[in-house]
């Protein structure tokens, strides 16, 4: 498969509404495979077709539980709310606080054009909402509460990177070898 160029904020295609997929052609199957490769290469958890320049209602998501391919997705129910930092591959290195539903139910077609329904909470619910916004020409920056800020790898807390206690052991070993 191939990596596709991710369109960034300011690209007009990101403001357009996508068309429904009526038939899954070999070209669209290739698009889905390329979208997954592109998302993984960019260390993302979701990617919508317009982000790679294609105005079709297709999103791919993987929050660490395996790929979820959604064709013509529609959110049918929401509940609760969650507020948290949100970023986007189309606005790299930036994030902002966004409030989204904590629970969503969505209907979609999979890569075999079979209909499914999914119930999602927390991160997966956030991702579904975020990616479906792209299909209607919207980006998270329209919903940000407060300032947008830069995000770097160093912003991640040390204990988020290492299992409990392992970070301290690693630091101690590094300090001993430096002496």
Image (tube, rainbow, N blue to C red):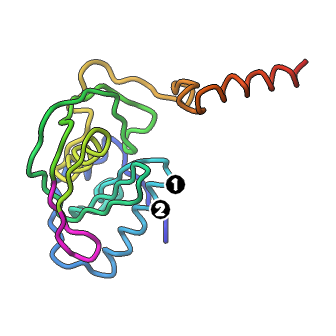
Q: Mark 1 Cα within 10 Å, few/some/many (few <14, many 20+)? A: few
Which label is found at residue 138?
none
Q: Is residue 87 left or right of residue 161?
A: left
- From the top left corner, tell me how far across and down residue 69 is, in percent: 31, 63
Residue found farthest to the bottom: 26
Q: Is residue 112 left or right of residue 2?
A: left
- From the top left corner, tell me how far across and down residue 150 is, in percent: 44, 26
Which quadrant of the figure contains the C terminus? top right
Quadrant in the picture for residue 148: top left
- Name the element at disc 2: helix
- Read off the residue under disc 1: 41
**Disc 2 and disc 1 in contact, CB within 8 angstroms:** yes
Q: Which residues are magenta?
A: 106-116
Quadrant in the picture for residue 19: bottom left
Q: Is residue 109 left or right of residue 32?
A: left
Q: Residue at x 12, y 37 (%)?
A: 79
| Vertical placement of residue 103 versus 65, above or below | above
- From the top left corner, tell me how far across and down residue 93 is, in percent: 46, 34
């Amino acid at each position: 498969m191939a990596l596709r160029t991710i369109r960034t904020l300011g690209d007009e295609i990101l403001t357009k509404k996508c068309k429904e997929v009526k038939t899954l052609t070999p070209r669209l199957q290739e698009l889905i495979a390329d979208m997954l490769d592109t998302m993984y290469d960019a260390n993302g958890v979701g990617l919508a077709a317009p982000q790679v320049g294609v105005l079709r209602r297709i999103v791919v998501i993987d929050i660490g539980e395996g790929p979820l391919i959604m064709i013509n997705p529609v959110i049918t129910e929401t509940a609760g709310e969650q507020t948290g930092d949100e970023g986007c591959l189309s606005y790299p290195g930036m994030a902002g606080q966004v409030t989204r539903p904590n629970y969503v139910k969505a209907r979609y077609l999979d890569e075999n054009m079979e209909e499914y329904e999914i119930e999602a909470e927390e991160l997966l619910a956030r991702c579904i909402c975020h990616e479906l916004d792209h299909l209607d020409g919207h980006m998270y920056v329209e919903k940000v509460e407060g300032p947008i800020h830069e995000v770097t790898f160093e912003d991640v807390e040390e204990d988020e990177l290492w299992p409990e206690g392992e970070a301290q052991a690693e630091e101690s070993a590094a300090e001993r070898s430096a002496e």
